[in-house]
Image (tube, helix red, strand yellow):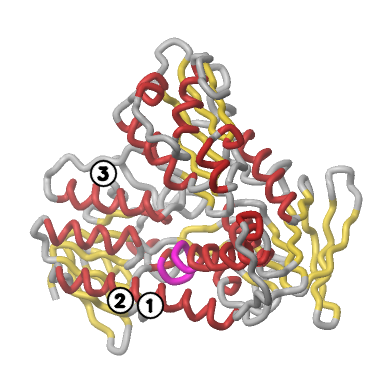
Amino acid sequence: MDFDVVIIGAGPGGYVAAIRAAQLGFKTACVEKYATLGGTCLNVGCIPSKALLHSSELYHQARSTMANHGVVCSDVSLDLGKMLARKNDVVDNLTKGVSGLLKKNKITEIHGTAKLLGNGKVEVSGEETQTITGKHIILATGSKPVQLPFLKFDKKDIISSTEALSLDTVPQHMVVVGGGVIGLELGSVWMRLGAKVTVVEFLDRILPPMDSAVSKEMKRILARQGMKFHLSTKVTAAERSGDKIILTAVDKKDKELKFEADKVLVCVGRKPYTEGLGLEDIGVTCDKAGRIEIDSHFQTNIPGVYAIGDVVAGPMLAHKAEEEGVALAEILAGKAGHVNYETVPNVVYTWPEVGAVGKTEEELKGTPLRIGKFSFKANSRGRCTGENDGMVKVIAHAETDRLLGVHIVGPTASELVQEAVAVMEFMGSAEDLARTFHGHPTLSEAVKEAALDVDKRAIHH
């Protein structure tokens, strides 16, 4: 079969690229090795984790915080099977929705493992082996969890984020190796459901790529919720003792530590998934980290072969992959497809949440800055709801007032950060954000107040 565009991988980058390509008139095929579409995000990533995060937070509220509102819940119990079944239903509905979108846009859906043969040819091995051709071939195969040599996944007791979404019982003690986004989110799920959770992080703070104010605030809040932290600590070995895993670690003072756990969740990053694609066979170049090298139009060194999403440089985020997919399809159609990497939002779906966009204060060292901050403790809506943990930090250029970064820890931070994304997309200033109407009482007023504080004129500071 001959196509204008062949996309390998039906995750957020791949299926979105396919839809946009079809909208632009290309005869399009999307190849996926797994039975369901949606990639890591829909199947074992963003979607199931957020479903569990929400369900586990409701359970936590019913057992503790709702009483503060005069809502007394007695005999609250956990039906873990039902919670997991609901999560599976959410995933099932959304993956079927993606398949429906491909059909609606007349995209050919092909299931099987793809291998590049060169000259626009792709071999797909599934129930039967077939060769298809594409004028443009887009690689969107995503990423997979990184394993540590001495902590290889057994998918039972030493687990990745995938297995952590489907545990049939609540662990007594879960040790999370890695204090990044995935570790904190899934650690939060099982902590709310009753597990003791200990986070061991090699660096000196959690959420290391984020602004230090965010890292500090989140550690304080999560520690108060019951999460234990060992920072500047390196896990060096693991051994089994009966039904337990004994981890050995060394802290910054070279003191040896031992952790006994029934589940060890390893979240030390993800790496591009390109195995079996035949990249070396046709000469596609990759960098030292295994990422496919591309030019400003997403093209590899092989004409007609492109790459987007987690297999290329940049943050491994579903929405980044989606925007790249749209931009590439538009470039192939002769349009001005473009991705503004300066405004990619980053979100952590703990509770409270983290929402961040732009540069951190550390990244802007040497740039003249003015910084505004505002606490949710002084936000009236936060007081009404009882959700007043966290803060907003607004960073602007000291001379131009251009908005350079906004970092939020607080309730619904994932939604609140989007107004900062919009302002930054139009190269707006802190003053633009400060002068914009915000309804009262709303959580978003905290963003306005932080923007006002850049000029030291916050009203409710």
In x, y percent, where is residue 355? 49, 43
Give the tally of numbered discs.
Answer: 3
Query: Within the image, what quadrant is residue 363 found in?
Result: top right
Q: Nearer the viewer, residue 352 or 257?
A: 352
Q: Which mark is residue 92?
A: 1
Q: Is-magenta flag for residue 45?
A: yes
In x, y percent, where is residue 162? 55, 71
Residue at mark 3 to residue at mark 2: CA–CA distance: 31 Å
In the rendered image, the vertical position of residue 156 relative to residue 229, given as above or below: below
Mark 2 lies on residue:
96
The three-letter amino acid code for the residue at tag 2 is Lys
Mark 1 lies on a secondary structure that is helix
Mark 2 lies on a secondary structure that is helix
Mark 3 lies on residue:
297
Instruction: Name the mark nearer the viewer: 3 or 1.
Output: 1
What residue is drawn where x is 79% and y is 59%? 236
